[in-house]
Amino acid sequence: MLQLAPSSTASVVALIICFVLVCVFEFANGFHDTANAVATVIYTRSLKPRTAVIWSGLMNLVGVLLGGISVAYALVELLPPDVLTPPNGNPAVPMLAALFGTALAWNLLTWWLGIPNSSSHCTIGALIGVAIGDSFLHARDLGHSVDWSQIWKVLRALAVSPVLGFILAGILYLLIRASVKLPALFTPPDQDDKPHPVVRCLLILTCTSVSFSHGSNDGQKSIGLIMLTIIGLLPASFAMNPGHPINRSELAGIAIEARPLIAQYDRFNFRQDALESVACLSNPSVPVTASVVRGDVYQILSGVQDVSANPAASGAERIQAKKLASRLRPSVEYAPMWVRILSALCLGIGTMVGYRRIVKTLGEGIGKQHLTPAQGAASELVGAGLIATAGYTGLPVSTTHIITSGVAGTMVAAGSGINARTLSKIALAWLTTLPVTIVVSACLFYIMA
């Protein structure tokens, strides 16, 4: 029987504040990321701003609902198990405050400066910072608190996707220019003229595709963060997935099966925590809270993931480790429908309030000439494809990075030239986001924990 862990009034108040912060962060995400989806359709006057952002918000909602949760927990797993679910069952207030405070502050600063920066970048940097802060707090080797294999996997996706966006958008623009003979596609919008019907339909289509794919990827990131908060607030209700009931005897069987693998292929010789979790779960007579069970499951998941990544393990053992992980994950990795809807609503409302600064930067600031409909369509179609692909493979990528790089690629392909001043500001923000958010988040977590 799983028991409720007591939480102090101060912890509950702090978690409520964190819940508000994560909603505000996703609202700010709309300033940056979702604004990319409506930039072209608004800039060319294909849709009125209010209509565009409402439509984009609806498509984000559909994307969130249909996009799954693999990206959400790809980010969550950057945290070490004892931070993700503290062993004593108490809410992880320092982790949440450091994470949301850092990411939100950097997001708002770059938005105020009109720089298309990545909310994903902010979140990942803050998560890594918390993991590093935890390692210093407990005087551990960084390999214990930081899952570097997961971090490199996430960072590779962030680094490669803008390059692909730049190249593929440039190629697609050249193909459009060679095959479509419609002057309106290649002429910067005139504020006094209505857009050509074909141009309007094309850009509404690309806005729809980017909005949907954004919801299927970026919307998941806030889902993971919201879940961390509500699990801390109401562990008895949300620590374990109510839609995937698993009893102690089933957990015990999985834990016993995982024990020899974890013990034999311990990459860093610090899997004592995982082995203790195995012992706890495999002994049904030990009373535990839902939070403790969740923490034990994550310790075992971390242990079997080490086996999957260990070159010394045989193919059969790696397959066995992955099967064990797939049996455990549904019990702790899930998201209720209301969490998905809340994520989409925060994204959409943020877009409605703060889209103007980013729209102007994308339309007029990246190239030496203003954006044409064909350039906007090419960058958005490529962006939608890359983002959707990443969303369904569980890789978090940045809508901002991909769309901005795509616009730059079309400018180069068209011979329009690049505005070096604007791009240098964007590049500086991209380069400084990770180190700044890592350092600030690590310091905040270390001080508050």
Image (cartoon, grey):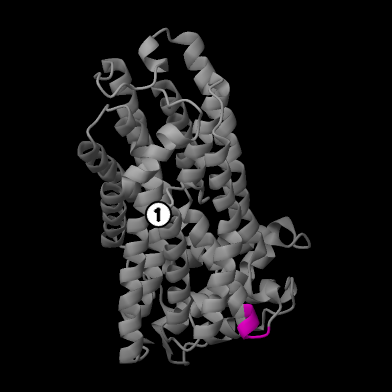
Q: Work out whether residue 397 or residue 288 is closer to the camera in this orientation and state it.
A: 397
Please tell me which residue lies in front, 19 or 446: 446
Instruction: Give the main secondary structure of the magenta stretch.
Output: helix
Residue sitting at x 57%, y 48%: 158
396 lies above or below 49: below
**Which residue lies at the image location 26% right of the left edge and 42% below the top edge?**
53
User: Which quadrant holds residue 435?
Assistant: bottom right
Query: Residue 355 in magenta?
Result: no
**Nearer to me, 136 or 335:** 136
Question: Which residue is at the far front?
Answer: 421
Q: Which residues are magenta?
A: 135-139
Mark 1 Cα shell of 10 Å, populated few (<14), some (14-19), many (≥20): few
Q: Position of residue 329 (x, y in %)?
A: 48, 65
> Does residue 60 appear to the left or right of 138 in the view shown?
left
On screen, residue 244 versus residue 58, left or right, reads right
Q: Tell me the residue that label 1 is attached to.
A: 112
Could you tell me residue 232's position as x and y percent?
38, 78
The answer to whether 20 is drawn above or below residue 273 in the figure is above
Q: Is residue 324 above or below residue 237?
A: above
Quadrant assignment for the N terminus: bottom left
State whether residue 176 is above or below residue 208.
above
* Circle 1: residue type: Trp
Q: At 77% across and 59% down in the image, what residue appears? A: 311
